[in-house]
Amino acid sequence: MCRGSGGADITPRGAREKGILALLALAPERARSRNWLKTKLWSERFDTQANTSLRRALSNIRKAFGPYADCLITDRVNIRLAPDVIILNDATSGGELLEDLFINDPEFDDWLRDTRMFFDAPQPSSALESPAPHTSYRRVMSISTDEAVSGEAGLLQNMLGDILAERLVATGPVEVYRNQRIDPKMPHDRIDVTAYPVGSQWVFSLSIVEAPKSRHVWSGRTRIDFTAKSNGESNPFARFCNEAIAALADRKINLAANSDPFFVMNFASARLFTGQNSDLRTGMALLDTVVSHQTDAALPLAWRGFAKLTKALDSSDTTTELAVSAMEDASKAVALSSSNSTALALAAHVHLLLSGDADYARFLAQKALTIDEEDPYAGFAAGTAAFYNGETQRGLDLVRWSRECAQPLTNSFFWDVQNAILGLSTHDFDDCYSSALLASAKMPTYRPALRYLIAIALLKNLPDEANRYVLRLRQLEPNFDVRRFIEDEYPVPSLRRVGLSEETVSRAARMIEQ
Protein backbone atom coordinates (compact mmCIF):
# COMPACT_ATOMS: atom_id res chain seq x y z
CA MET A 1 0.00 0.00 0.00
CA CYS A 2 1.16 3.55 -0.79
CA ARG A 3 0.42 6.61 1.29
CA GLY A 4 1.27 10.23 0.79
CA SER A 5 3.07 12.14 3.52
CA GLY A 6 -0.36 13.29 4.74
CA GLY A 7 -1.60 9.70 5.18
CA ALA A 8 -3.87 9.49 2.12
CA ASP A 9 -4.08 6.11 0.34
CA ILE A 10 -2.66 6.69 -3.15
CA THR A 11 -2.12 3.04 -4.17
CA PRO A 12 -2.60 2.48 -7.94
CA ARG A 13 -4.89 -0.38 -8.98
CA GLY A 14 -2.70 -2.18 -11.56
CA ALA A 15 -0.27 -4.95 -10.56
CA ARG A 16 2.57 -3.62 -12.73
CA GLU A 17 2.00 -0.10 -11.43
CA LYS A 18 2.42 -1.48 -7.91
CA GLY A 19 5.43 -3.41 -9.15
CA ILE A 20 7.11 -0.23 -10.39
CA LEU A 21 6.62 1.40 -7.00
CA ALA A 22 8.00 -1.66 -5.18
CA LEU A 23 11.05 -1.77 -7.45
CA LEU A 24 11.70 1.93 -6.86
CA ALA A 25 11.03 1.88 -3.11
CA LEU A 26 13.54 -0.94 -2.58
CA ALA A 27 16.20 0.49 -4.91
CA PRO A 28 19.25 2.52 -3.86
CA GLU A 29 18.15 6.18 -3.63
CA ARG A 30 14.69 5.02 -4.78
CA ALA A 31 15.74 5.29 -8.43
CA ARG A 32 16.06 2.91 -11.38
CA SER A 33 16.65 3.30 -15.10
CA ARG A 34 13.74 2.86 -17.49
CA ASN A 35 15.59 0.02 -19.15
CA TRP A 36 16.06 -1.82 -15.84
CA LEU A 37 12.36 -1.51 -14.98
CA LYS A 38 11.37 -2.82 -18.41
CA THR A 39 13.60 -5.89 -17.98
CA LYS A 40 11.90 -6.69 -14.68
CA LEU A 41 8.25 -6.15 -15.66
CA TRP A 42 8.07 -6.69 -19.43
CA SER A 43 11.03 -9.00 -20.07
CA GLU A 44 9.12 -11.13 -22.59
CA ARG A 45 7.91 -8.26 -24.76
CA PHE A 46 9.56 -6.43 -27.62
CA ASP A 47 11.22 -3.15 -26.70
CA THR A 48 8.59 -0.98 -28.41
CA GLN A 49 5.78 -2.79 -26.56
CA ALA A 50 7.65 -2.50 -23.27
CA ASN A 51 8.16 1.25 -23.80
CA THR A 52 4.45 1.76 -24.45
CA SER A 53 3.48 -0.31 -21.40
CA LEU A 54 5.90 1.57 -19.16
CA ARG A 55 4.59 4.97 -20.30
CA ARG A 56 1.00 3.87 -19.68
CA ALA A 57 1.87 2.52 -16.23
CA LEU A 58 3.63 5.76 -15.25
CA SER A 59 0.59 7.74 -16.35
CA ASN A 60 -1.66 5.51 -14.23
CA ILE A 61 0.58 5.99 -11.19
CA ARG A 62 0.44 9.78 -11.54
CA LYS A 63 -3.35 9.64 -11.76
CA ALA A 64 -3.52 7.52 -8.60
CA PHE A 65 -1.09 9.84 -6.80
CA GLY A 66 -3.30 12.86 -7.42
CA PRO A 67 -1.73 15.79 -5.55
CA TYR A 68 1.43 13.70 -5.10
CA ALA A 69 1.92 13.19 -8.86
CA ASP A 70 5.11 15.27 -8.82
CA CYS A 71 6.66 12.70 -6.45
CA LEU A 72 7.18 10.40 -9.43
CA ILE A 73 10.20 12.04 -11.04
CA THR A 74 11.07 10.93 -14.56
CA ASP A 75 13.42 11.83 -17.37
CA ARG A 76 14.43 10.06 -20.59
CA VAL A 77 16.71 7.64 -18.74
CA ASN A 78 15.74 7.28 -15.08
CA ILE A 79 12.68 7.15 -12.83
CA ARG A 80 12.78 8.16 -9.18
CA LEU A 81 10.34 8.11 -6.28
CA ALA A 82 10.40 11.09 -3.90
CA PRO A 83 10.49 10.42 -0.13
CA ASP A 84 7.04 12.00 0.30
CA VAL A 85 5.52 8.70 -0.89
CA ILE A 86 5.53 5.99 1.79
CA ILE A 87 5.39 2.34 0.77
CA LEU A 88 3.88 0.20 3.53
CA ASN A 89 5.59 -3.19 3.60
CA ASP A 90 3.72 -6.45 4.25
CA ALA A 91 6.80 -7.84 5.99
CA THR A 92 6.70 -5.17 8.71
CA SER A 93 3.40 -6.56 9.98
CA GLY A 94 4.47 -10.19 10.05
CA GLY A 95 3.56 -11.05 6.48
CA GLU A 96 5.80 -11.90 3.57
CA LEU A 97 7.30 -9.11 1.51
CA LEU A 98 4.80 -8.04 -1.20
CA GLU A 99 2.77 -11.20 -0.56
CA ASP A 100 -0.33 -9.84 -2.31
CA LEU A 101 1.49 -8.72 -5.43
CA PHE A 102 1.51 -11.14 -8.37
CA ILE A 103 3.11 -10.19 -11.68
CA ASN A 104 3.44 -12.76 -14.44
CA ASP A 105 7.04 -12.13 -15.42
CA PRO A 106 10.00 -14.45 -14.68
CA GLU A 107 12.43 -11.55 -14.19
CA PHE A 108 10.18 -9.96 -11.55
CA ASP A 109 9.79 -13.35 -9.86
CA ASP A 110 13.59 -13.69 -9.65
CA TRP A 111 13.96 -10.17 -8.25
CA LEU A 112 11.24 -10.74 -5.65
CA ARG A 113 12.73 -14.07 -4.57
CA ASP A 114 16.21 -12.57 -4.17
CA THR A 115 14.88 -9.53 -2.31
CA ARG A 116 12.83 -11.65 0.09
CA MET A 117 15.97 -13.59 0.98
CA PHE A 118 17.43 -10.43 2.50
CA PHE A 119 14.22 -8.87 3.79
CA ASP A 120 12.56 -11.73 5.66
CA ALA A 121 14.91 -11.66 8.68
CA PRO A 122 16.64 -8.97 10.76
CA GLN A 123 19.18 -7.21 8.60
CA PRO A 124 22.92 -6.81 9.28
CA SER A 125 24.06 -3.57 10.84
CA SER A 126 25.89 -2.51 7.70
CA ALA A 127 24.79 -2.67 4.09
CA LEU A 128 28.01 -4.47 3.26
CA GLU A 129 27.77 -6.96 6.12
CA SER A 130 26.01 -10.29 5.90
CA PRO A 131 25.16 -13.22 8.16
CA ALA A 132 28.32 -14.96 9.34
CA PRO A 133 28.50 -18.58 8.16
CA HIS A 134 29.50 -21.11 10.80
CA THR A 135 33.29 -21.29 10.96
CA SER A 136 33.69 -24.96 10.08
CA TYR A 137 30.14 -25.91 9.07
CA ARG A 138 29.66 -27.84 5.85
CA ARG A 139 26.27 -28.79 4.48
CA VAL A 140 25.69 -32.51 4.60
CA MET A 141 24.60 -34.27 1.40
CA SER A 142 23.62 -37.93 1.45
CA ILE A 143 23.61 -39.81 -1.87
CA SER A 144 21.67 -43.09 -1.74
CA THR A 145 21.46 -45.83 -4.35
CA ASP A 146 19.42 -49.01 -4.17
CA GLU A 147 21.95 -51.49 -2.81
CA ALA A 148 19.67 -54.38 -3.69
CA VAL A 149 20.20 -53.62 -7.38
CA SER A 150 23.18 -55.35 -8.94
CA GLY A 151 24.66 -55.93 -12.37
CA GLU A 152 24.63 -53.19 -14.97
CA ALA A 153 21.90 -51.19 -13.22
CA GLY A 154 23.89 -51.11 -9.98
CA LEU A 155 27.05 -50.13 -11.83
CA LEU A 156 25.32 -47.25 -13.62
CA GLN A 157 23.65 -46.04 -10.41
CA ASN A 158 27.03 -45.86 -8.71
CA MET A 159 28.59 -44.15 -11.71
CA LEU A 160 25.93 -41.41 -11.59
CA GLY A 161 26.38 -41.14 -7.82
CA ASP A 162 30.16 -40.76 -8.19
CA ILE A 163 29.83 -37.96 -10.76
CA LEU A 164 27.21 -36.20 -8.65
CA ALA A 165 29.46 -36.39 -5.56
CA GLU A 166 32.42 -34.91 -7.49
CA ARG A 167 30.29 -32.07 -8.81
CA LEU A 168 28.84 -31.30 -5.37
CA VAL A 169 32.29 -30.99 -3.79
CA ALA A 170 33.35 -28.58 -6.55
CA THR A 171 30.25 -26.43 -5.98
CA GLY A 172 30.63 -25.45 -2.33
CA PRO A 173 31.46 -26.41 1.25
CA VAL A 174 29.74 -29.80 1.60
CA GLU A 175 30.24 -33.19 3.22
CA VAL A 176 29.06 -35.95 0.90
CA TYR A 177 28.10 -39.37 2.26
CA ARG A 178 27.37 -42.42 0.11
CA ASN A 179 24.81 -44.96 1.31
CA GLN A 180 25.39 -44.11 4.97
CA ARG A 181 22.71 -43.70 7.61
CA ILE A 182 22.34 -40.05 8.64
CA ASP A 183 20.64 -38.95 11.84
CA PRO A 184 17.15 -37.98 10.58
CA LYS A 185 17.16 -34.99 12.94
CA MET A 186 20.34 -33.57 11.37
CA PRO A 187 19.73 -30.95 8.64
CA HIS A 188 20.86 -32.50 5.37
CA ASP A 189 19.82 -33.13 1.79
CA ARG A 190 19.05 -36.70 0.77
CA ILE A 191 19.57 -37.51 -2.91
CA ASP A 192 18.10 -40.80 -4.15
CA VAL A 193 19.55 -42.28 -7.34
CA THR A 194 17.81 -44.93 -9.43
CA ALA A 195 18.42 -46.51 -12.84
CA TYR A 196 16.46 -48.99 -14.93
CA PRO A 197 16.43 -50.08 -18.60
CA VAL A 198 13.71 -49.26 -21.12
CA GLY A 199 14.40 -50.93 -24.45
CA SER A 200 17.82 -49.84 -25.70
CA GLN A 201 17.86 -46.87 -23.33
CA TRP A 202 18.51 -46.39 -19.62
CA VAL A 203 16.32 -44.15 -17.48
CA PHE A 204 18.02 -42.34 -14.59
CA SER A 205 16.17 -40.42 -11.91
CA LEU A 206 17.28 -38.19 -9.06
CA SER A 207 15.08 -37.10 -6.17
CA ILE A 208 16.19 -34.53 -3.58
CA VAL A 209 14.53 -34.16 -0.19
CA GLU A 210 15.55 -31.70 2.53
CA ALA A 211 15.67 -33.28 5.98
CA PRO A 212 14.46 -33.19 8.69
CA LYS A 213 11.49 -31.31 7.19
CA SER A 214 11.05 -33.94 4.44
CA ARG A 215 10.56 -31.04 2.06
CA HIS A 216 10.73 -31.96 -1.61
CA VAL A 217 13.40 -29.88 -3.35
CA TRP A 218 13.65 -31.30 -6.86
CA SER A 219 13.25 -34.44 -8.91
CA GLY A 220 14.27 -35.16 -12.45
CA ARG A 221 14.63 -37.92 -14.98
CA THR A 222 16.70 -38.42 -18.10
CA ARG A 223 17.03 -41.10 -20.77
CA ILE A 224 20.42 -42.12 -22.13
CA ASP A 225 21.12 -44.43 -25.06
CA PHE A 226 24.66 -45.69 -24.55
CA THR A 227 24.62 -47.41 -27.95
CA ALA A 228 24.14 -44.11 -29.80
CA LYS A 229 27.09 -42.21 -31.20
CA SER A 230 28.08 -39.32 -28.93
CA ASN A 231 28.80 -36.79 -31.73
CA GLY A 232 31.31 -35.08 -29.45
CA GLU A 233 28.68 -34.02 -26.93
CA SER A 234 29.43 -33.78 -23.22
CA ASN A 235 29.16 -36.72 -20.83
CA PRO A 236 25.44 -37.64 -20.78
CA PHE A 237 25.45 -37.62 -16.97
CA ALA A 238 27.02 -34.16 -16.70
CA ARG A 239 24.09 -32.01 -17.71
CA PHE A 240 21.70 -34.06 -15.56
CA CYS A 241 23.95 -33.72 -12.49
CA ASN A 242 24.40 -29.99 -13.04
CA GLU A 243 20.62 -29.58 -13.28
CA ALA A 244 20.23 -31.27 -9.89
CA ILE A 245 23.00 -29.18 -8.32
CA ALA A 246 21.48 -25.97 -9.68
CA ALA A 247 18.21 -26.93 -7.98
CA LEU A 248 20.06 -27.54 -4.71
CA ALA A 249 22.00 -24.27 -4.83
CA ASP A 250 19.23 -22.01 -6.13
CA ARG A 251 16.35 -23.11 -3.90
CA LYS A 252 14.31 -20.36 -2.28
CA ILE A 253 15.74 -19.80 1.18
CA ASN A 254 15.84 -16.99 3.70
CA LEU A 255 19.45 -15.97 3.14
CA ALA A 256 19.44 -13.37 5.91
CA ALA A 257 18.53 -16.04 8.47
CA ASN A 258 20.51 -18.88 6.89
CA SER A 259 24.22 -18.97 7.65
CA ASP A 260 24.92 -22.09 5.59
CA PRO A 261 28.03 -21.20 3.56
CA PHE A 262 26.89 -23.46 0.70
CA PHE A 263 23.85 -21.26 0.09
CA VAL A 264 25.59 -17.97 0.84
CA MET A 265 28.45 -18.68 -1.58
CA ASN A 266 26.22 -19.93 -4.39
CA PHE A 267 23.90 -16.95 -4.00
CA ALA A 268 26.93 -14.62 -4.03
CA SER A 269 28.57 -16.19 -7.08
CA ALA A 270 25.32 -15.98 -9.07
CA ARG A 271 25.23 -12.21 -8.45
CA LEU A 272 28.57 -11.79 -10.28
CA PHE A 273 27.03 -12.48 -13.68
CA THR A 274 23.97 -10.20 -13.81
CA GLY A 275 25.74 -7.14 -15.21
CA GLN A 276 24.42 -4.97 -12.37
CA ASN A 277 26.99 -3.11 -10.25
CA SER A 278 24.76 -3.41 -7.18
CA ASP A 279 24.69 -7.21 -7.58
CA LEU A 280 28.46 -7.30 -8.01
CA ARG A 281 28.92 -5.34 -4.77
CA THR A 282 26.50 -7.66 -2.96
CA GLY A 283 28.28 -10.74 -4.25
CA MET A 284 31.71 -9.44 -3.22
CA ALA A 285 30.48 -8.50 0.27
CA LEU A 286 28.98 -11.95 0.82
CA LEU A 287 32.15 -13.64 -0.42
CA ASP A 288 34.20 -11.51 1.97
CA THR A 289 32.07 -12.88 4.79
CA VAL A 290 32.40 -16.52 3.69
CA VAL A 291 36.19 -16.17 3.31
CA SER A 292 36.57 -14.64 6.76
CA HIS A 293 34.56 -17.39 8.48
CA GLN A 294 35.66 -20.52 6.61
CA THR A 295 38.74 -22.51 7.61
CA ASP A 296 38.94 -24.07 4.14
CA ALA A 297 38.32 -21.05 1.95
CA ALA A 298 39.82 -22.14 -1.38
CA LEU A 299 36.60 -21.99 -3.39
CA PRO A 300 35.22 -18.72 -1.90
CA LEU A 301 38.69 -17.17 -2.35
CA ALA A 302 38.69 -18.20 -6.00
CA TRP A 303 35.20 -16.77 -6.46
CA ARG A 304 36.25 -13.54 -4.77
CA GLY A 305 39.25 -13.30 -7.09
CA PHE A 306 36.92 -13.82 -10.05
CA ALA A 307 34.59 -11.09 -8.68
CA LYS A 308 37.51 -8.65 -8.42
CA LEU A 309 38.56 -9.58 -11.96
CA THR A 310 35.03 -8.81 -13.15
CA LYS A 311 35.06 -5.43 -11.40
CA ALA A 312 38.54 -4.61 -12.73
CA LEU A 313 37.50 -5.43 -16.30
CA ASP A 314 34.25 -3.48 -16.00
CA SER A 315 36.17 -0.42 -14.79
CA SER A 316 38.62 -0.85 -17.72
CA ASP A 317 41.57 -0.86 -15.35
CA THR A 318 43.55 -4.04 -14.76
CA THR A 319 46.57 -2.41 -13.15
CA THR A 320 45.07 -1.20 -9.88
CA GLU A 321 45.26 -2.60 -6.36
CA LEU A 322 41.99 -4.37 -7.09
CA ALA A 323 43.63 -6.39 -9.86
CA VAL A 324 46.60 -7.19 -7.62
CA SER A 325 44.20 -8.32 -4.89
CA ALA A 326 42.36 -10.56 -7.39
CA MET A 327 45.67 -12.25 -8.27
CA GLU A 328 46.44 -12.74 -4.58
CA ASP A 329 43.06 -14.38 -3.96
CA ALA A 330 43.56 -16.69 -6.95
CA SER A 331 47.04 -17.70 -5.80
CA LYS A 332 45.85 -18.37 -2.24
CA ALA A 333 43.01 -20.51 -3.58
CA VAL A 334 45.48 -22.66 -5.54
CA ALA A 335 47.75 -22.97 -2.49
CA LEU A 336 44.85 -24.04 -0.25
CA SER A 337 43.35 -26.62 -2.60
CA SER A 338 44.81 -28.64 -5.44
CA SER A 339 41.71 -30.84 -5.76
CA ASN A 340 38.76 -28.46 -6.30
CA SER A 341 38.22 -28.19 -10.05
CA THR A 342 36.12 -25.01 -9.90
CA ALA A 343 38.62 -23.18 -7.67
CA LEU A 344 41.50 -24.09 -10.03
CA ALA A 345 39.46 -23.08 -13.09
CA LEU A 346 38.54 -19.68 -11.67
CA ALA A 347 42.15 -19.08 -10.60
CA ALA A 348 43.33 -20.00 -14.11
CA HIS A 349 41.02 -17.41 -15.66
CA VAL A 350 42.15 -14.69 -13.25
CA HIS A 351 45.82 -15.40 -14.02
CA LEU A 352 45.17 -15.52 -17.75
CA LEU A 353 43.46 -12.14 -18.00
CA LEU A 354 45.40 -10.22 -15.36
CA SER A 355 48.97 -11.55 -15.59
CA GLY A 356 48.82 -12.74 -19.19
CA ASP A 357 50.59 -15.97 -18.15
CA ALA A 358 48.88 -18.29 -20.65
CA ASP A 359 51.15 -21.25 -19.83
CA TYR A 360 50.37 -21.19 -16.11
CA ALA A 361 46.68 -20.65 -16.84
CA ARG A 362 46.71 -23.67 -19.14
CA PHE A 363 48.43 -25.76 -16.45
CA LEU A 364 45.80 -24.86 -13.82
CA ALA A 365 42.89 -25.28 -16.22
CA GLN A 366 44.11 -28.65 -17.47
CA LYS A 367 44.53 -29.81 -13.87
CA ALA A 368 40.95 -28.74 -13.16
CA LEU A 369 39.74 -30.63 -16.23
CA THR A 370 41.63 -33.77 -15.16
CA ILE A 371 39.95 -33.64 -11.74
CA ASP A 372 36.43 -33.21 -13.14
CA GLU A 373 35.83 -33.06 -16.87
CA GLU A 374 32.11 -32.47 -16.22
CA ASP A 375 32.85 -29.18 -14.42
CA PRO A 376 31.71 -26.48 -16.89
CA TYR A 377 34.09 -23.94 -15.31
CA ALA A 378 37.03 -26.30 -15.90
CA GLY A 379 36.05 -26.77 -19.54
CA PHE A 380 35.65 -23.04 -20.04
CA ALA A 381 39.01 -22.23 -18.42
CA ALA A 382 40.83 -24.95 -20.37
CA GLY A 383 39.23 -23.83 -23.62
CA THR A 384 40.09 -20.17 -23.10
CA ALA A 385 43.67 -21.03 -22.08
CA ALA A 386 44.08 -23.22 -25.17
CA PHE A 387 42.80 -20.37 -27.34
CA TYR A 388 45.33 -17.95 -25.82
CA ASN A 389 48.08 -20.51 -26.46
CA GLY A 390 47.23 -20.66 -30.16
CA GLU A 391 45.20 -23.91 -30.02
CA THR A 392 42.10 -22.40 -31.59
CA GLN A 393 40.16 -25.54 -32.50
CA ARG A 394 40.89 -27.27 -29.19
CA GLY A 395 39.74 -24.11 -27.39
CA LEU A 396 36.47 -24.07 -29.32
CA ASP A 397 35.85 -27.78 -28.73
CA LEU A 398 36.39 -27.44 -24.97
CA VAL A 399 34.17 -24.38 -24.65
CA ARG A 400 31.39 -26.07 -26.64
CA TRP A 401 31.72 -29.19 -24.50
CA SER A 402 31.47 -27.18 -21.29
CA ARG A 403 28.60 -25.13 -22.72
CA GLU A 404 26.53 -28.33 -22.98
CA CYS A 405 27.27 -29.14 -19.33
CA ALA A 406 26.40 -25.59 -18.23
CA GLN A 407 22.96 -25.24 -19.80
CA PRO A 408 21.00 -26.06 -16.60
CA LEU A 409 22.89 -23.36 -14.66
CA THR A 410 21.31 -19.96 -14.03
CA ASN A 411 24.38 -18.27 -15.55
CA SER A 412 24.53 -20.47 -18.68
CA PHE A 413 24.60 -17.25 -20.74
CA PHE A 414 28.24 -16.88 -19.64
CA TRP A 415 29.15 -19.95 -21.74
CA ASP A 416 27.02 -18.72 -24.66
CA VAL A 417 29.13 -15.57 -24.77
CA GLN A 418 32.39 -17.54 -24.53
CA ASN A 419 31.27 -19.62 -27.50
CA ALA A 420 30.62 -16.42 -29.45
CA ILE A 421 33.97 -14.92 -28.44
CA LEU A 422 36.13 -17.90 -29.35
CA GLY A 423 34.14 -18.48 -32.53
CA LEU A 424 35.32 -15.13 -33.85
CA SER A 425 38.65 -16.76 -34.73
CA THR A 426 36.91 -18.99 -37.31
CA HIS A 427 34.96 -16.04 -38.80
CA ASP A 428 31.74 -18.04 -38.42
CA PHE A 429 29.89 -14.84 -37.57
CA ASP A 430 26.42 -16.40 -37.92
CA ASP A 431 27.11 -18.93 -35.13
CA CYS A 432 28.80 -16.24 -33.02
CA TYR A 433 25.84 -13.92 -33.45
CA SER A 434 23.33 -16.65 -32.50
CA SER A 435 25.28 -17.46 -29.34
CA ALA A 436 25.53 -13.81 -28.29
CA LEU A 437 21.83 -13.26 -29.00
CA LEU A 438 20.93 -16.24 -26.83
CA ALA A 439 23.09 -14.92 -23.99
CA SER A 440 21.51 -11.46 -24.20
CA ALA A 441 18.01 -12.96 -24.23
CA LYS A 442 18.80 -14.90 -21.04
CA MET A 443 20.36 -11.90 -19.27
CA PRO A 444 19.54 -8.55 -20.96
CA THR A 445 21.88 -6.58 -18.66
CA TYR A 446 24.95 -8.77 -19.30
CA ARG A 447 27.38 -6.30 -20.85
CA PRO A 448 29.82 -8.76 -22.51
CA ALA A 449 26.92 -10.11 -24.59
CA LEU A 450 25.95 -6.60 -25.72
CA ARG A 451 29.56 -5.65 -26.52
CA TYR A 452 30.07 -8.65 -28.77
CA LEU A 453 26.61 -8.31 -30.32
CA ILE A 454 27.64 -4.82 -31.45
CA ALA A 455 30.95 -6.07 -32.86
CA ILE A 456 29.49 -9.10 -34.62
CA ALA A 457 26.56 -7.12 -36.05
CA LEU A 458 29.06 -4.68 -37.58
CA LEU A 459 31.15 -7.54 -38.97
CA LYS A 460 27.96 -8.99 -40.49
CA ASN A 461 27.10 -5.59 -42.05
CA LEU A 462 24.00 -5.15 -39.92
CA PRO A 463 24.27 -1.45 -38.97
CA ASP A 464 20.69 -1.12 -37.67
CA GLU A 465 21.15 -4.08 -35.35
CA ALA A 466 24.51 -2.76 -34.18
CA ASN A 467 23.00 0.64 -33.42
CA ARG A 468 20.18 -1.00 -31.44
CA TYR A 469 22.67 -2.78 -29.20
CA VAL A 470 24.78 0.36 -28.86
CA LEU A 471 21.73 2.12 -27.42
CA ARG A 472 21.10 -0.76 -25.03
CA LEU A 473 24.71 -0.83 -23.87
CA ARG A 474 24.66 2.93 -23.28
CA GLN A 475 21.89 2.37 -20.74
CA LEU A 476 24.54 0.47 -18.75
CA GLU A 477 27.66 2.32 -19.96
CA PRO A 478 26.53 5.89 -20.70
CA ASN A 479 29.85 6.90 -22.30
CA PHE A 480 30.20 3.86 -24.57
CA ASP A 481 31.68 4.48 -28.02
CA VAL A 482 32.55 1.77 -30.57
CA ARG A 483 36.03 3.29 -30.90
CA ARG A 484 36.75 1.90 -27.42
CA PHE A 485 37.08 -1.57 -28.99
CA ILE A 486 40.65 -0.75 -30.06
CA GLU A 487 41.68 0.48 -26.61
CA ASP A 488 43.82 -2.07 -24.77
CA GLU A 489 42.03 -1.57 -21.47
CA TYR A 490 38.49 -2.04 -22.84
CA PRO A 491 37.22 -5.57 -21.97
CA VAL A 492 37.03 -7.14 -25.46
CA PRO A 493 40.50 -8.79 -25.52
CA SER A 494 39.48 -11.66 -27.82
CA LEU A 495 38.19 -9.22 -30.44
CA ARG A 496 41.60 -7.55 -30.49
CA ARG A 497 43.43 -10.88 -30.27
CA VAL A 498 41.91 -12.16 -33.53
CA GLY A 499 42.56 -8.81 -35.22
CA LEU A 500 38.94 -7.75 -35.66
CA SER A 501 38.73 -4.71 -33.38
CA GLU A 502 40.05 -2.25 -35.97
CA GLU A 503 37.81 -3.73 -38.66
CA THR A 504 34.82 -3.32 -36.33
CA VAL A 505 35.66 0.32 -35.62
CA SER A 506 36.24 0.96 -39.32
CA ARG A 507 32.82 -0.41 -40.21
CA ALA A 508 31.24 1.66 -37.47
CA ALA A 509 32.88 4.78 -38.88
CA ARG A 510 31.52 4.01 -42.36
CA MET A 511 28.08 3.44 -40.82
CA ILE A 512 28.21 6.91 -39.22
CA GLU A 513 29.32 8.52 -42.50
CA GLN A 514 26.40 6.98 -44.37
Image: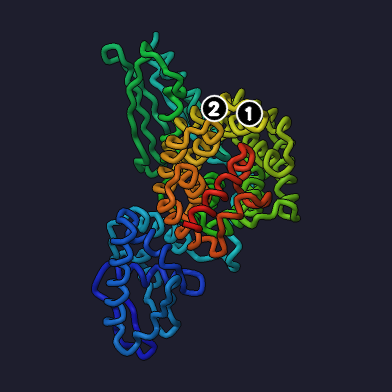
Up/down of 283 relative to 67, above or below: above
Q: Position of residue 29 (x, y in %)?
A: 51, 74
Up/down of 306 relative to 239, above or below: below
Which quarter of the image is occupied by the N terminus?
A: bottom left
Judge whether residue 184 can be spotted in this image: no
Give SS at disc 2: helix
Residue at x-position 33% and y-position 17%? 202
Residue at x-position 31% and y-position 83%? 65
In terms of depth relative to the viewer, which is nearer, 122 or 51? 51
In terms of depth relative to the viewer, which is nearer, 499 or 150? 499
Specify whether 98 is left or right of 258: left
- The three-letter amino acid code for the residue at tag 2 is Leu
Q: How many marks?
A: 2
Q: What is the CA distance from the residue labelled 1 to the residue labelled 2? A: 9 Å
Q: Which mark is residue 398?
A: 2
Residue at x-position 32% and y-position 74%? 58
Quick one: label 1, few (<14), some, or many (20+) residues within 10 Å?
Answer: many
Up/down of 139 relative to 126, above or below: above
Quick one: label 2, few (<14), some, or many (20+) residues within 10 Å?
Answer: many
Q: Which mark is residue 320?
A: none
Labels 1 and 2 touching (C-beta < 8 A): yes
Specify whether 295 is left or right of 378: right
Residue furthest to the front: 514
Task: Find disc 1 in the rendering and name its residue.
Answer: 386
- The three-letter amino acid code for the residue at tag 1 is Ala
Judge whether residue 69 can be spotted in this image: yes
In terms of depth relative to the viewer, which is nearer, 264 or 17? 17
Q: Position of residue 276 (x, y in %)?
A: 51, 58
